[in-house]
Image (spheres, grey):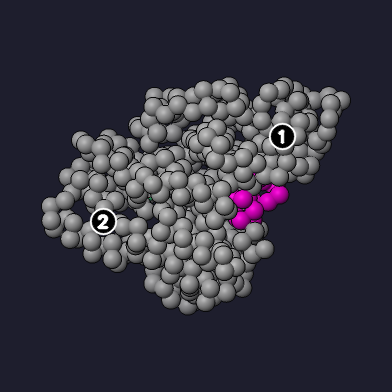
Amino acid sequence: MSTLIKNGRIITAEQDYTADIFIEKDKITTIGLSLNITADKIIDAKGKYVIPGGIDVHTHLDMPFGGTTSSDNFETGTRAAAFGGTTSLIDFAIQPKGKSMREGLDIWRKKAEGKATIDYGFHMIITDLPDERIPEMDDMVAEGVTSFKLFLAYPNVLMVDDATIFKALKQTSNNGGLVCMHAENGMVIDHIVKETVANGNLTPLYHALSRPAAAEAESTNRAIALAEMAGTPIYIVHLTCNDALLKVSEARYKGQPVYAETCTQYLYLSIDDISKPDFEGAKYVFSPPVREKWNQEKLWGGLQKNELQVVSTDHCPFNFVGQKDLGKNDFTKIPNGGPGIENRMQMIYDGGVNEKRISLNRWVEITSTNPAKIFGMYPRKGSIAPGSDADIVIWDPQKDYLISAKTHHMNVDYSMFEGRKVRGIAETVISRGEVIVENDNFFGKAGRGNFVKRDTYGAAWK
Ligand code: URP
Ligand code: ZN
Ligand code: ZN
């Protein structure tokens, strides 16, 4: 199978030019002006942008949490991702407590195999790390699972102590992996939550009020200090607020290899959303929580100044009816997480490029190229160049789109961005040379997505 994309405006993290792209099987083979090559399929991309497929490095598909399971599995979640212009994702496998990382990886590979419609990798969530298990991190790296998430939040469930984090960081300094940190002070938050509940404050808003920005800033700072002591890079996940951003920028200013992502929801949602009456605030319960609105512009500023390098989604959907309502009378029982995998590219395009906060190149960089570089997939992914995987999105910059749960493809009964109008959508989505989305029709077969074995020593090391 071969495809010729003609007349498109090719936008990468560095370049912006008009040319034709020739794809043979799963790879880009030729880029040039007015290519005179016969192809099985010809797509005219005049007036459209041609970008590397989006890469979402933070998703939770089919993930057990709080007595329920996230509502998108690897089939529905990857399909929704594709509709939104995302052609690769990295999900989080979880080491079962007291068991091996390999057991966790096997569980997650089974969840994905036969289902995923786009390419996927895994980070490994480390839940306990006695000394004898430390070499398992090297086994994961050998499998292409080259990043690890550790939690400073959720005591008794996922939280690990500082020494464990330090040991994990030390191990990545030897094996070229990367530690990703959920930075919130879980012990203090647990205490505030207990006080909050004891005072009879049980509505969703109190989820946010019991997880202060200072708890995130403190843990971000601590994680950065642990990485400094271990002499290795670190990546802070789902950074929400200016207080935490200041810790990242200070470390980067000093020259420490600290990297961080924010997520779409923190750029758009705030404490106003979680304050909505009649339990509607539960739609916006995730951790770390929404913040005061003024933080949003600070986060956009962080993206502009490269203090933040990536926008991911932390896609972790739970239905409003039947899942979020487990916490109807007690916010501590609301499963944490929200849906967003489908909307990331268009929300960052609209709020970023259309609103003139970032350039087209920067949009591609923070949604595709940096994720590929930091997580060991570049230049296979995140780039448009001969030899790269033909993961390509043809983007219509003029098309208006109304975000709604009525029309989205995520398997969840609400949208965090319901009613928002955006301009710019993924018109055609190509994954390893195969057109999987065209004009809102889906052609990708379940199971066609490949596991991506990722490299060590990604961009965080450079
Ligand atoms: O609320 C969230 N973010 N749920 C998913 C788990 C995590 O911490 O990323
Ligand atoms: Zn997290
Ligand atoms: Zn997450």
Q: On the image, numbered disc 1 is attached to which residue?
A: 10
Per the image, label 2 sits on a secondary structure element best described as loop
Q: Position of residue 427 (x, y in %)?
A: 60, 26
Q: Quadrant of the N terminus?
A: top right
Left or right of 415: which side holds 47? right
Q: Is residue 421 visible?
A: yes
In the picture, measured across the screen, residue 71 lies left or right of residue 145, that is left
234 and 148: which one is in front?
Answer: 234
Residue 284, image x and y in percent?
A: 33, 42
Q: Residue at x 25, y 41 (%)?
A: 275
Q: Which mark is residue 210?
A: 2
Closer to the camera in the image, 271 or 113: 271
Q: Amino acid at mark 1?
A: Ile
Which disc is residue 424 wearing?
A: none
Q: Residue lying farthest right?
A: 36
Residue 234 is covered by the magenta coloring? no
**For the residue marked with disc 2, what is the amino acid?**
Ser
Please name the residue shown 76% across and 38% down the image.
28
- Pick the residue in front: 115 or 287: 287
Residue drawn at x 60%, y 55% is 375
Magenta residues, start to end: 370-382
Task: Judge whether 212 appears above or below 39 on screen.
Answer: below
Q: Main secondary structure of the magenta part?
A: loop
Foreground: 295 or 164? 295
